Amino acid sequence: MTFDAIDAWWWPFLFILVAGWVATDAWRFLGVHLGSRLAEDSEALVLVRAVATALVAAVIGNLVIFPAEPLASTSVALRFGAVALGFVAYLTLGRRVIVAIIVMELVFGLGLWANL
Amino acid sequence: MSEARATAPSLAERRTWYLRGCIAAASIPGLILASAFIGFASLAKGAGLTMAQSVFMTGVVWALPAHVVLVGAILAGASLPAAMFAVTLSSVRLMPMVVAIVPELRGSRTPRWVLYLLSHFVAVTSWVVAMERLKNVPPDLRTSYYFGLGSTLVLANMLIVACFYLVADKLPVVVSAALLLLTPMYFLSSLWGSAREWATHAAMVIGLVLGPLFHLLVPQFDLVAAGILGGALAYGLHRLLGGKSYS
């Protein structure tokens, strides 16, 4: 039952629909359903948010340490350094996402230029 | 929550606020999202997805971390239940986001189905923009505004994925690499900024370390393992330290 398991045009779309759409919109619909019922500061939601955040953080870590091509041909030290400096800039310069991105791309570009 | 209105908004009013929502999509977060989707287009193409599949995924899933997880699962040759499980776990955070936005969106006579429909547009970018600007929109017109914002973001990015899928091979290597690195930076900073309690920040730090670690140890279950273990650890620390949340 992998993405390439069935040789029909509709199979990859069904795969995306079940593994992608159902898996995301189920949470959104549950969110509407709970809407006013669940207190936003409830303990259950703290745990739910912590698990969800750790999972997305794991995605972030893997995107930096084990990326796809062509990013994979750059050095891991440069990728890590660029994102780390971008994040430091975010924390110190007014917590703006755009600042993090500009600093990260500048460091990354300079690093590539200097063949780091 | 300002004035309660005696009459339902007219169609012209709805159209005005719908269009204002469309315009709000052209913002800095919208631009960052578009660049991240250019990165996604090359990621999807590299993983062997067709253009139609990539555009379809953009429209029906509409949550970039879920896209990355799903493409990763496809690349790893995961089965349908395994892929679905990983995406389900990665998307839990959509639920509290929707819970938070529903009271803001709801007018005095908003039917349920409208909220279910609009919830599909909830993802980091539209959520951040909406939470910032909805307070300046009359309560009964917020659904129109958010429909404009959400639908514009989805359609524009489907178009972007289609266009950049075609040219993904022709982009200079440096540009593709720089775009691919934009997604983790965008997630890292916007998620850090949206955290409500200390536990969330702890979970981020632990997850950042556990993700690559489990990628080496248990490649098939790296995200799930890092999510459950990292989340439980962060929650445990949070309880031990008395459960502070940011005000």
Image (cartoon, coloured by chain):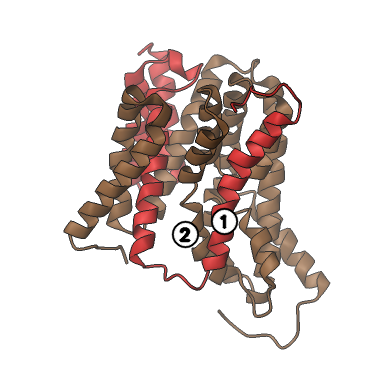
Chain colours: A red, B brown
Q: Residue at x 65, y 68 (%)?
A: B142
Circle 2 chain = B
Quarter placement of the C terminus of chain B: bottom left
Closest to the observer, B27 or A84: A84
Q: Residue at x 44, y 47 (%)?
A: B190
Residue B235 in picture, x, y percent from top left: 27, 53
Q: Residue at x 68, y 25 (%)?
A: B165
On screen, residue A86 above or below B129: above
Using the numbered discs, state the Cα–Cα distance from disc 1 to disc 2 in whole angstroms: 9 Å
Is residue B176 found left or right of B117 in the rendered image?
A: left
Q: Quick check: can you spot residue A86?
A: yes
Residue under label 1 = A28
Question: Picture quarter containing residue A13?
Answer: top right
Residue A96 in picture, x, y percent from top left: 42, 48
On screen, residue B87 above or below B20: above
The residue positioned farthest toward the bottom in the image shown: B6
- Element carrying mark 2: helix
Question: Picture quarter containing residue A45?
Answer: bottom left
The residue positioned farthest toward the right in the image shown: B11
Count of marks placed on residues: 2
Q: Residue at x 66, y 40 (%)?
A: A17
Quarter placement of the N terminus of chain B: bottom right
Q: Which mark is residue B96?
A: 2
Amino acid type at mark 2: Pro
